[in-house]
């Protein structure tokens, strides 16, 4: 575990990862109440297209230019990871790591208290995340796993970064607004308001260029890009101290939980990676379907059935429509058996490795300590550059 990421000092000339000419947004954007939504989906379509190009570039170039595709992503340690995390993000992280991109994974522990009053079982949750990362195939020799509370220089970057954003910008961040709405009438804390800036520090401290995220995190990435740009302009005389990172949107469609609503651990409708095969079977057996006997793949009309087919399809790498044909008149019962088998067989190795790691907690802790030390060294260098360009080296 002696790997140190290649030079993380700031590039002076910033190569563009993805061509900045983006596909044209339709000119005639309606001005009615749907305007905002239409605009959001047009922006999303652009982001998807850029992600697709980026993904191709990673295929062809990451192995030769690992620093140009340095990747950072992360999770809040609020509980165990479920199959949605596995399908939408864990598998993808391993794929990118294996393509040769330098990778960082932040366990965003300070973000836990953005929308709740207590940290909960944070030590166990952090440990559990590291176990799931390792079990999924994240290799600690190539990927730096760290908690941001253990990297002081990263947190200090938040101060100059906060000077680059306005309160109006923070207040209109749609993700912050949604999280505030979901936090049950809690007043907006300073940390919830400013956590997108903290997230920018997570991304920029290691000069990461590729940020695999879900759609909900796109506003944070836009803000990160603005912070990088403004820092270069205002404090660095136009030098490219920070490059603007790109979002890498996953291919996985939004998955529903076993009750047919959004998959979320807070709703108790998930299959966790650490669940046993029997717990998985019980959970899937209890999943809602509908009254129609014959199984068909019709996402609009039959969302719950389509969701189960989608999950099985993702695990089996098959099209959900083909699986629907195969189940056909077998009905909900056969469908659930198919899903259970797909999940349990696909996760068998993961769960075995998980159990092995659970017997060696000292190793898991050592991985985290090593990652924290590596991240701290990178952050120290970046902070030194920031202080130097701001004339703060005394
Ligand atoms: N906010 C992210 C989430 O809730 C987690 C996160 C923290 C993150 N820092 C990050 C994701 C930096 C990407 C990049 O899922």
Image (spheres, rainbow, N blue to C red):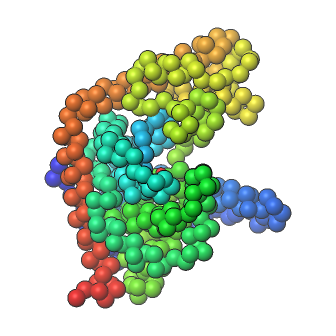
Using the image as rendered, state which of residue 151 and residue 253 is in the foreground.
151
Using the image as rendered, state which of residue 203 and residue 368 is in the foreground.
368
Percent position of residue 60, x then y: 41, 52
**Side (left or right) of 252 relative to 104:** right
Residue at position x 41%, y 38% in the image: 80
Residue at position x 61%, y 55% in the image: 185
Question: Which corner quadrant of the image does residue 262 belong to?
Answer: top right
Question: 49 above or below 244?
Answer: above
**Side (left or right) of 25 relative to 369:** right
Using the image as rendered, state which of residue 321 and residue 272 is in the foreground.
272
**Side (left or right) of 259 relative to 272:** right
Question: 208 above or below 292?
Answer: below
Percent position of residue 249, x then y: 53, 51
Percent position of residue 225, x then y: 49, 69
Residue at position x 56%, y 70% in the image: 170
> Quick check: which quadrant has ligand 1?
bottom left
């Amino acid at each position: 575990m002696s790997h140190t990421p290649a030079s993380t000092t700031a590039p002076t000339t910033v190569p563009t990862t993805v061509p900045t000419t983006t596909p044209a947004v339709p000119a005639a954007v309606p001005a009615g109440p749907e305007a905002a939504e239409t605009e959001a989906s047009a922006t999303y379509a652009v982001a998807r297209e850029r992600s697709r190009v980026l993904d191709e570039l990673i295929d062809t170039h990451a192995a030769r230019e690992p620093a140009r595709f340095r990747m950072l992503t992360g999770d809040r340690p609020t509980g165990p990871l479920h199959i949605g995390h596995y399908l939408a993000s864990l598998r993808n992280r391993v794929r990118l790591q294996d393509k040769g991109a330098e990778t960082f994974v932040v366990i965003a522990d300070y973000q836990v208290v953005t929308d709740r009053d207590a940290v909960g079982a944070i030590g166990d949750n952090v440990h559990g995340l590291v176990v799931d990362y390792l079990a999924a195939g994240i290799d600690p020799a190539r990927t730096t796993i760290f908690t941001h509370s253990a990297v002081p220089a990263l947190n200090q970057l938040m101060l100059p970064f906060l000077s680059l954003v306005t309160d109006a910008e923070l207040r209109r961040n749609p993700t912050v607004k949604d999280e505030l709405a979901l936090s049950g009438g809690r007043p907006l804390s300073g940390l919830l308001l400013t956590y997108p800036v903290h997230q920018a520090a997570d991304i920029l401290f290691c000069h990461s260029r590729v940020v695999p995220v879900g759609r909900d995190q796109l506003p944070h990435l836009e803000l990160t890009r603005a912070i990088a740009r403004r820092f270069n302009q205002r404090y660095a005389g136009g030098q490219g101290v920070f490059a603007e990172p790109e979002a890498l949107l996953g291919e996985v469609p939004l998955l529903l939980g076993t009750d047919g609503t959004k998959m979320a651990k807070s709703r108790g409708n998930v299959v966790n990676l650490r669940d046993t095969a029997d717990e998985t079977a019980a959970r899937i057996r209890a999943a809602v379907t509908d009254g129609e006997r014959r199984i068909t793949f019709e996402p609009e009309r039959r969302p719950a059935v389509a969701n189960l087919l989608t999950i099985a399809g993702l695990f089996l790498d098959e099209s959900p429509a083909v699986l629907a044909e195969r189940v056909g008149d077998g009905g909900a019962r056969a469908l659930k058996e198919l899903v259970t088998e797909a999940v349990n067989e696909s996760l068998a190795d993961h769960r075995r490795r998980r159990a092995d790691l659970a017997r060696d907690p000292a190793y898991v802790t050592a991985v985290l300590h090593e990652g924290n030390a590596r991240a701290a060294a990178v952050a120290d260098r970046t902070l030194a550059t920031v202080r130097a360009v701001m004339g703060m080296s005394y």
